[in-house]
Image (cartoon, rainbow, N blue to C red):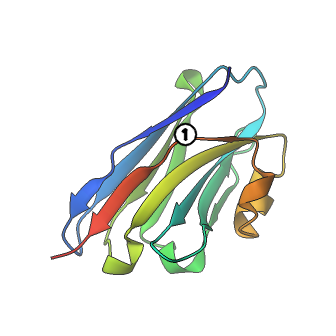
């Protein structure tokens, strides 16, 4: 049984930082991508960032470029999303998702959440003063 468990969300003031983690278990494939999506109240889920396992290729949506950094520890099947210079508009539930093969980042870039194979339950990030 594949499980993705996020942690690291919380409340932070504008300009602050948070680091999200996503631990993947039960996924036997050694080639999969990890993506982060977010969903704010009243809005659709959108792709935020992604990283592929084999070549480390990354993707960031335009609004988070230069502020968010995605990374992964393949040995421990964990992905991270370092979020700096947070803004109120970053407030959302953040979900990590995994997709086997080479197309995860294309799915994230296209905001095609339904295409991802596995999902975590989400972690709330609140940015406010």
> Image quadrant of residue 45?
bottom right
Badge count: 1
Q: Residue at x 27, y 54 (%)?
A: 10
Q: Is residue 129 found left or right of 127 in the rendered image?
A: left
Q: In the image as oriented, which residue stretches furthest toward the left?
A: 129
Q: Position of residue 110 (x, y in %)?
A: 76, 70
- Residue 102 visible from this viewpoint: yes
User: Which is more toward the observer, 112 or 54?
Assistant: 112
Q: Position of residue 54 (x, y in %)?
A: 75, 38
Quadrant where the image shows the C terminus: bottom left
Q: Residue at x 23, y 66 (%)?
A: 16
Q: On screen, 84 above or below 74?
A: below
Number of other residues with Cα within 10 Å of mark 1, as a class: few under 14, some 14 to 19, many 20 or more: many
> Image quadrant of residue 32?
top right
Q: Which residue is mark 1?
A: 72
User: Which is more toward the observer, 69 or 101?
Assistant: 101
Quadrant where the image shows the N terminus: top right
Q: Residue at x 56, y 47 (%)?
A: 96
Q: Is residue 41 found left or right of 51 in the rendered image?
A: left
Q: On screen, 10 above or below 23?
A: below
Q: On screen, 59 above or below 77?
A: below
* Element on which disc 1 rests: strand
- Residue 105 visible from this viewpoint: no
Q: On screen, 114 above or below 26?
A: below
Q: Position of residue 27 (x, y in %)?
A: 70, 24
Q: Is residue 50 found left or right of 12 in the rendered image?
A: right
Q: Residue at x 54, y 77 (%)?
A: 43
Q: Is residue 10 found left or right of 33 in the rendered image?
A: left
């Amino acid at each position: 049984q594949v499980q993705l468990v996020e942690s690291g969300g919380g409340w932070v003031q504008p300009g602050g930082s948070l680091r999200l983690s996503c631990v993947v278990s039960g996924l036997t494939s050694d080639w999969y991508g990890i993506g982060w999506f977010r969903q704010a109240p009243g809005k659709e889920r959108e792709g935020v960032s992604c990283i592929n396992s084999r070549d480390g290729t990354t993707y960031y949506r335009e609004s988070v470029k230069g502020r968010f950094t995605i990374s992964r520890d393949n040995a421990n099947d964990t992905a991270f999303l370092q979020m700096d210079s947070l803004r109120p508009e970053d407030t959302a539930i953040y979900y990590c998702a995994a997709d086997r093969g080479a197309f995860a980042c294309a799915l994230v870039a296209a905001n095609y959440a339904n295409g991802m194979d596995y999902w975590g339950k989400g972690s709330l990030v609140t940015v406010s003063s």
